[in-house]
Image (spheres, rainbow, N blue to C red):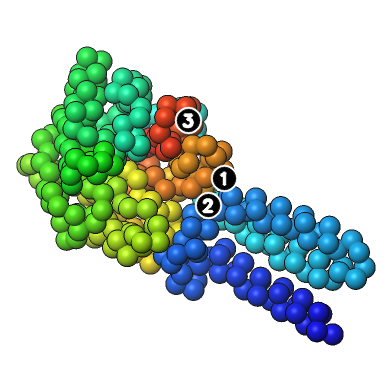
Amino acid sequence: MLPRILGWAAVVVTAAIAAILVWPQAFGLQNQWISAHVVALRGSAAAAGIAAAALFALLALPRRTRRFGIAMASVLALFAAGNVAVLAMRGLGSSAAPAEASDADAVTVLAWNTLGEVPDAQTIADLALREGADVISLPETTDPLGEDVAVAMRDGGRPMWVHTLAFDDIAKARSTTLLISPDLGDYEVVSAEWPGPPGNTNTLPTVVAEPVDGDGPRIVAVHAVAPIRWELRNWRSDLDYLAGLCTGEDVILAGDFNATLDHFAGRGVDGGDLGRCSDAARAGGAAGLGTWPTDLPPVLGSPIDHVLATPNWEVASFRVLGEFDDAGSDHRPIVATLVRAG
């Protein structure tokens, strides 16, 4: 009798944990350690659930453990199915080529965490030139590399202004570079040169640029800290700070948020995913594709790199670029084309 009671108790506990990990925002746990990591890797979690369900299905073959094995296999299969369903709803496809956006108000945004400048300047510039990027967000990129990218793009016929913010020179990860086309007008950096709200993110720098004449979107190159255990408080603070940047009427954010749509839950207003900003990947049907790490297939990875914009922008296309997985960075570049609504 006791083994049977313990077995069913294990099934109930597993089912409760599975429910929490499939949709932690229902319990307010999406920003807590462990659940934040599991939900960030829904594809991998689903694969693990399928593998575990298969093992318990084998356990169901002997008559003595049949009921327990079937119950556990069912719980784990439902856990996997729940994660797959979320990914499918968010989108697992992206067009092979950018959607046409001939509107003069179209803006193409490229974001790529360069892992401390592993991809060289020419690789970044060639990609930006190929995509016709107007805005380039490069977390973990210092000013010298940003200047080299701008020179290569100028030589390619597309000059760019370079704005870099560094908290220190100890590590390249402590720098973020933002390139903006002169076609968008003159911009100035308004974010603080020291860490922490209200002027910046806490550990890694975010570049906030405003149009000098007030005509144009606020453009933000994002780098939030990862939710490792000793940085959880800073990570949550970073997401709150970024949501606050999206309370305006005309804002574009791009870069490494170290967060998925699940982690944004509770920080949206007026229908936005983060502040008033909405995720271009969701609108482009690709919000289930992982951008990190590059050594996992996109469906098993974590979609933590984003382009977000306020409702005055519509998404013409969004793509996760997997052809650069061997370029050295552990992040995939993303590119979105936005067009002014109305």
- Tell me, yes or no, whether the two marked residues, 1 and 2, touch with CB atoms within 8 Å: yes
Residue at label 1?
A: 300
- The secondary element bearing badge 2 is classed as loop
Tell whether 185 sits left or right of 264: left
Residue 67, which numbered label? none
- Mark 1 to mark 2: distance in Å? 7 Å
- The amino acid type found where label 2 is placed reads Leu
Give whichever of 5, 76 is nearer the camera: 5
- In the rendered image, the vertical position of residue 110 relative to residue 193, given as above or below: above
Residue at label 2?
A: 41
Tell me which numbered mark, 3 or 2, is placed earlier along the sequence.
Answer: 2
Residue 176 in the image: x percent, y percent? 24, 40
Residue 120 in the image: x percent, y percent? 32, 24
Residue 325, which numbered label? 3
- Mark 1 to mark 3: distance in Å? 14 Å
- The amino acid type found where label 3 is placed reads Asp
- Mark 3 to mark 2: distance in Å? 18 Å
Question: Furthest residue to the front?
Answer: 170
Residue found at x 34% / y 34%: 114
